Image (tube, rainbow, N blue to C red):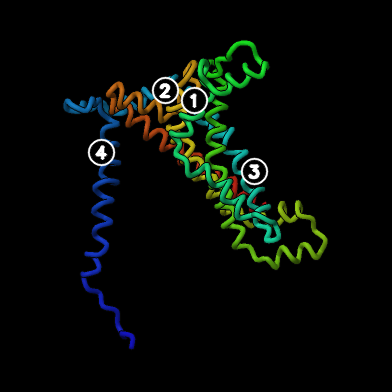
Amino acid sequence: MFAKTIRKDHYGYYFIAPFFIIFTTFGLYPILYSLYISFTNFDGITTPDFVGIGNYVAVIQDPLFYKTLFNTLFIWGVSVVPQLTISLVLAFILNDKLLKGRDFFRAVYFFPNIVTAASLGLLVSLIFDWQSGGLNHFLVQTGIIQDPINWKNDPWFMRLIVSSILFFQYFGYSMVIYLAGLQGIDPSLLEAAQMDGAKKKHIFIHIIVPMLRPIILFQMITSIIGGIQIFDQPFTLTNGNGGPDRAAMTSIMYLYNVAFQSTRFGYGAAIAFCLFIIIILLSVASFIMTKRKSRS
């Protein structure tokens, strides 16, 4: 019925070859070519001029790069910390089988994740528009304010708007990931804790959170990767200029402006690999912090 020996023919390679061909063509080769371009001055037309680590030195000395990096990390921190916390609490609440309408609320909370990031950015931009925005129109009509407010003229407010968009769009996705993790926890543990008189907040803190540490680590690392790559929301919100004092210009927006608007592809590639290193460092830091907490 079953073969006693495993045939090791070469035909299996034909089945896995398409993946490696596609990955090499559209994944590995562009990465390696971008790494080469990062050591050159290249405008996309003429022959690349090799400059060594000159582009990386320029990135390290570029104050605008640090400004956009600060914007990115600020927007990421303000949106992700409440997002991961509130989504975990909501997942714990919606995991209760006795809760009525929990499937409805799961769908409602996840719905913003279906909307594209560019659409949300454009919608919020229209709401906070100075002259024709819906918010100013409502406040003026109700007599709360006399004259329209130029919301987009405040740098810190622009950062908070972008953070709010990210929170609104992704907290439902995080909630679903936590719900999947909660399904893997043995219900008998929670029932035993309840029988011993433990309250829900104690069950949440001392049982749920420790057992979900791998999921929390996954959420942290994926949020770091996605947070450093923020582009659509601030780009559509500020029409690509980053808002007042470039307060909402993220690192990827800066990379886009340098590479595709100024045609400085070598410098743009160097920025990309610097961001890649930052993502690795932040991911490793999150992994170490999570492991230390689990040991303690």
Residue under label 2: 239
Quote the CA–CA distance across marks 1 and 4.
Answer: 37 Å
Farthest bottom residue? 1
* Amino acid type of the residue tagged 4 in the rendering: Tyr
Disc nearer the start of the sequence (4/2): 4
Task: List x then y, in percent, for residue 270.
Answer: 34, 30
Q: Which mark is residue 125?
A: 1
Residue under label 4: 33
Quote the CA–CA distance across marks 4 and 2.
Answer: 30 Å
Q: Is residue 175 above or below residue 167?
A: below
15 horizontally vs 173: left or right: left
Task: Please report the residue visible at 51 percent of the width from the left and 15 percent of the height from the top.
Answer: 131
Circles 2, 1 touching at the beta carbon (< 8 Å):
yes
Q: Which mark is residue 86?
A: 3
Q: Nearer the viewer, mark 1 or mark 4?
A: 1
- In the rendered image, is residue 91 in sight? yes
Say what secondary structure mark 1 lies in: helix
Disc nearer the start of the sequence (3/2): 3
